[in-house]
């Protein structure tokens, strides 16, 4: 089983945008998708998720509509907007750049300085 990692500050919105970009999801489905795409390493608490979904919707990065879930209950389904797709691309590029810089910095040996 994978160790669970804490979600870094500022990454929850990016993870939600990524999860929703992979297909229309209800709130609990977003939690499950983040866990799935992180190989079980990241788990989001519902108390953090729903305010973030509200914030992203208010910012126009995701949109929602009511539908019926697999267990025949009414659920709010989220999908990415054009602005959300643009933000996802920008934030993904920024995080990839940061991850590459961190990898380079952590790979330096004493002989290389």
Image (spheres, rainbow, N blue to C red):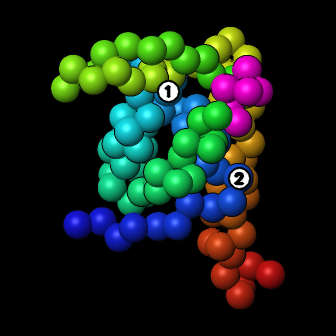
Residue 57, picture quadrant: top right
Horizontal and vertical percent for residue 90? 74, 31
Q: 82 or 31: which is nearer to us?
A: 31
- Is residue 13 toward the left or the right of residue 3 in the image? right
The answer to whether one can see residue 25 in this image is no
- Residue 60 seen anywhere in this rendered image of the structure: yes
Magenta stretch in the rendered image: 55-60
Mark 2 nearby-residue class (10 Å; few <14, some 14–19, many ≥20): few
Image point 66% across, 81% down: which residue?
109
Q: Position of residue 9 (x, y in %)?
A: 69, 60
Q: Check disc 1 and report the residue beneath it.
A: 20
* Point 30% across, 65% down: residue: 2
| Helix, strand or loop: magenta stretch | helix
**Which residue extends farthest bottom?**
110
Quick one: SS at disc 1?
helix
Q: Which residue is denoted by mark 2 in the rendering?
A: 10
Q: Residue furthest right?
A: 113
Q: Tell me which residue sits at (77%, 27%) in the image.
A: 59
* Marks 2 and 1, how far apart at CA: 17 Å
- Residue 59: in magenta span: yes
Compared with residue 109, is residue 11 higher up or lower down, i.e. above or below? above
Residue 12 at x, y percent in the picture: 60, 48
Residue drawn at 36 percent across, 34 percent down: 29
Circles 2, 1 touching at the beta carbon (< 8 Å): no
Q: Is residue 67 above or below residue 30?
A: above
Circle 1 crowding by C-alpha within 10 Å: few under 14, some 14–19, many from 20: many
Q: Which mark is residue 28?
A: none
Q: Residue furthest left?
A: 71
Camera-side residue: 80 or 108? 80
* Residue nearer the viewer, 16 or 91: 16
**Which of the two discs, 2 and 1, labels the residue nearer the N terminus?**
2
Give the side of residue 3 with respect to residue 53, left or right: left
């Amino acid at each position: 089983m994978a160790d669970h990692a804490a979600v870094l500050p500022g990454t929850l919105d990016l993870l939600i945008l990524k999860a929703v970009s992979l297909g229309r999801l209800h709130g609990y489905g977003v939690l499950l998708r983040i866990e799935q795409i992180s190989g079980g390493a990241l788990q989001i608490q519902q108390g953090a998720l729903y305010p973030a979904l509200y914030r992203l919707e208010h910012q126009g990065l995701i949109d929602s509509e009511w539908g019926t879930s697999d267990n025949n209950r009414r659920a709010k389904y989220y999908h990415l907007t054009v602005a959300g797709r643009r933000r996802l691309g920008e934030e993904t590029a920024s995080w990839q750049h940061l991850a590459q810089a961190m990898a380079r910095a952590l790979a330096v040996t004493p002989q290389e300085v």
